[in-house]
Amino acid sequence: MTEYPRLILGSSSPHRRLLLARFGVPFEVSVPDIDESALPGERPEALVDRLARAKAAAVAARHPDAIVIGSDQVAVLDGQIYGKPHTHARAVQQLSRAAGRTVHFLTAVCVMAPGGRVVGCETVPTAVHFRPLSADEIENYLAQESVLACAGSFQSEGLGVSLCESMRSDDPTALIGLPLIAVRRLLAEAGLPIPLPARAMESATSSGNR
């Protein structure tokens, strides 16, 4: 029976964990400890690609025997990067500026094979058009949704969908934080086919070693 490498998600995001769990493949989680600050003059596309690579590399260095997934996301409006707000005031500011406009969310993923070899990195864009929002609507949203660690102060999988008029993307999972269509393709290239053969799944589940 074919033995597949361990799979590790390099992320602290519970949303990414839930997304990867859709594949039904046992995986571990290891949180990368990296500086996520943008470099001077760094473009949004370059930033998310660099951070996804850095997250994967940080985890791969600790687990050289595993396939590692790293991912990052930023929101962009008028060429300006909107990262995690961290404070209520910044969340209000971000949503106020997004109201009635289209914000582009860039979600990057990088997969490394055992030994730290980069299999590939891809960035998936999503265009979200926000409806006009009053100050009260923004406050009501922030009172009910924890978004201080979310790019652009927004979660489409929760109450955030009520702020939108439309979303456009080739992969609806990208906006949530992990573009599964790209992930599946990259995992296959790394030697982990999805879905796994049934016998391999039974072995992995019964062994309980992942």
Image: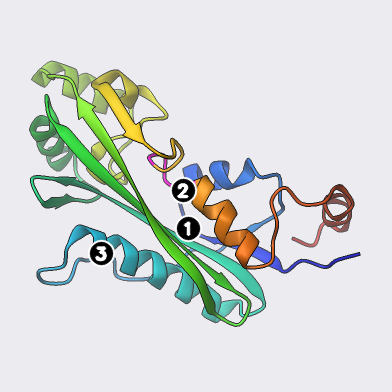
The secondary element bearing badge 1 is classed as loop
Specify which label sits upstream in the sequence, 3 or 1. Answer: 1
Does residue 33 appear in the picture of this structure? no
Range drawn in magenta: 175-179
The local crowd at label 3, few if under 14, some if 14 to 19, many if 20 or more residues have their Cα within 10 Å, is many
The secondary element bearing badge 2 is classed as loop
Q: Is residue 177 magenta?
A: yes
Q: Amino acid at mark 3?
A: Leu
Q: Amino acid at mark 1?
A: Ser
Q: Is residue 26 left or right of residue 200?
A: left
Q: Which residue is mark 3?
A: 47
Label ID, residue 11: 1
Does residue 137 appear in the picture of this structure? yes
Question: Within the image, what quadrant is residue 99 found in?
Answer: top left
Specify which label sits upstream in the sequence, 1 or 2. Answer: 1
Q: Is residue 194 above or below residue 146?
A: below
Dots 1, 2 in contact, CB < 8 A = yes
Dots 3, 1 in contact, CB < 8 A = no
Q: Is residue 101 left or right of residue 7?
A: left
Label ID, residue 178: 2
Q: Nearer the viewer, residue 125 or 146?
A: 125
The secondary element bearing badge 3 is classed as helix
Question: Within the image, what quadrant is residue 22 found in?
Answer: top right
